[in-house]
Image: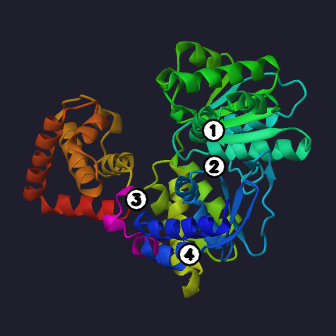
């Protein structure tokens, strides 16, 4: 394709990204500084300033790739590189293995220990469980595991054919094969693989023909005893885009659930992330660690985004220790709905302060003191998070939104009669 046409499309995409990137400082200082470096075969190389910029830009890589291909009506791989690593990204079978994700820097905790152990067992000679499906919430480390498997497999078996792909890209490949009448070639390409890693299978198209091709490839690879390793945000029985025969096939292998991360696990992850990626820049105080973990919903990808925002802002200020004040300053806590304190933390704190059993407060127990504490919890959750009345009700044994509204009004009356109690609760919640 004409390089000038690609360059014009790239410039247009960069300008359009201004409306997508929420932090305009990031856009002006990082995104807008990207340069089109070169085009080789099916790969477009985009040059950025440094490794830190690359980290930020990679958060938008999927959108950049989509916009470029939409402009050009093509199917390019887009690869972000720094001047030091120009064109050194490992590309194999038109597939990019993100070398940042390895087993060595995967942070193991009680929530993901089982999935990590299984991922490493794949390389043992007597391991024959196939297919493997990792299930977990958004940002729970599933993609990291898939990349780690791909990298390890590539290191151990450099002559083997490996492919990592997201389900949406698979759908695009299939649809493209329809329009170019190359569906048989696409099947052959996939059937020549030794290991297929497919991410976010919950997004696979509901179109019958696409699932039919996936089912064919899936079955043939299993028959040939080739590994299929998948990841999903959704449990098998909730994969509504699949026929029952497909869900049955998924269940025939090994399904590994990655549990929701505890606060201690989240603190460990934050600390390790800083050690791995920002050790030369600064550390984080125990109070700040507690503050961030109390506000994490378990989405580690989102949490890493918060860390990148903080480091981007303090990079030029020579700040060596992240404190709660710095977090509040650079994450704009008051207007950041994604960084609210977890409601479970609020409930636990208030029950502890008022010496009431938490299970009784959450349950349908109607003892007066339990009810009053329950109402106070509802009020504080409403004030400190962006949760709806219905969502708050779900925390307390699925109470209705009307019950929550009434409970909040009762809590306000309790506080109006006892200002000392109000101050006591409010000040302690502020310290979380």
Q: Nearer the viewer, residue 242 or 429?
A: 242
Q: Position of residue 155 (x, y in %)?
A: 88, 47
Reading the image, the residue beneath label 1 is: 173
| Distance (Cα) linking label 4 and label 3 | 24 Å
Numbered mark located on residue 75 in the image: 2
Q: Is residue 165 left or right of residue 321?
A: right
Q: Residues within 10 Å of mark 4 (few under 14, many from 20)?
A: some
Reading the image, the residue beneath label 4 is: 30
User: Mark 3 vs mark 1: which is more N-terminal?
Assistant: 1
Q: Nearer the viewer, residue 115 or 407?
A: 115
Numbered mark located on residue 111 in the image: none
Report the residue at 19% width, 44% height from top.
375
Could you tell me what secondary structure mostly forms the magenta stretch?
Answer: helix
Reading the image, the residue beneath label 3 is: 339
Q: Is residue 149 left or right of residue 426?
A: right
Q: Do callouts 1 and 4 mark residues in contact (Cβ within 8 Å)?
A: no
């Amino acid at each position: 394709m004409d390089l000038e046409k690609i360059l014009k499309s790239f410039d247009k995409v960069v300008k359009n990204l201004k409306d997508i990137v929420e932090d305009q400082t990031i856009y002006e200082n990082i995104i807008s500084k990207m340069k089109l470096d070169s085009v080789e075969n099916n790969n477009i190389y985009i040059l950025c300033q440094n490794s830190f910029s690359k980290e930020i830009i990679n958060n938008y890589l999927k959108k950049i790739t989509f916009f470029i291909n939409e402009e050009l009506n093509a199917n390019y791989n887009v690869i972000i590189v720094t001047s030091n690593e120009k064109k050194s990204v490992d590309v194999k079978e038109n597939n990019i293995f993100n070398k940042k994700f390895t087993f060595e820097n995967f942070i193991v905790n009680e929530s993901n220990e089982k999935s990590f152990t299984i991922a490493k067992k794949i390389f043992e000679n007597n391991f024959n469980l196939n297919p493997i499906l990792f299930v977990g919430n958004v940002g729970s480390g599933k993609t990291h595991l898939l990349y780690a498997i791909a990298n390890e497999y590539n290191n151990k078996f450099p002559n083997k054919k490996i492919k990592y792909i997201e389900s949406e890209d698979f759908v695009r490949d299939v649809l493209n094969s329809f329009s170019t009448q190359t569906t048989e070639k696409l099947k052959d390409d996939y059937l020549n693989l030794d290991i297929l890693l497919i991410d976010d299978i919950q997004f696979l198209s509901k179109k019958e023909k696409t699932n039919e091709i996936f089912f064919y490839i899936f079955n043939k690879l299993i028959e040939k005893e080739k590994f299929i390793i998948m990841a999903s945000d959704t449990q098998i029985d909730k994969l509504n885009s699949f026929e029952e025969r497909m869900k049955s096939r998924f269940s025939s292998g090994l399904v590994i659930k990655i549990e929701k991360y505890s606060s201690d696990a989240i603190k460990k992850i934050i600390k390790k992330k800083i050690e791995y990626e920002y050790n030369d820049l600064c550390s984080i105080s125990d109070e700040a660690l507690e503050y961030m973990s109390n506000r994490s919903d378990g989405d580690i990808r989102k949490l890493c985004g918060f860390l990148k925002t903080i480091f981007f802002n303090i990079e030029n200020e020579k700040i060596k220790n992240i404190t709660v004040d710095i977090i509040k300053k650079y994450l704009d806590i008051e207007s950041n709905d994604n960084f609210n304190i977890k409601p479970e933390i609020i409930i636990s704190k208030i029950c502890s302060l008022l010496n009431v059993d938490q299970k009784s407060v959450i349950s349908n127990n109607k003892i007066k003191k339990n009810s009053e504490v329950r109402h106070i919890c509802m009020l504080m959750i409403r004030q400190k998070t962006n949760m709806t009345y219905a969502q708050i009700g779900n925390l307390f044994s699925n109470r209705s939104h009307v019950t929550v509204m009434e409970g909040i009004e009762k809590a306000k009356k309790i506080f109006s009669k006892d200002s000392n109690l109000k101050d006591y609760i409010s000040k302690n919640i502020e310290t979380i």
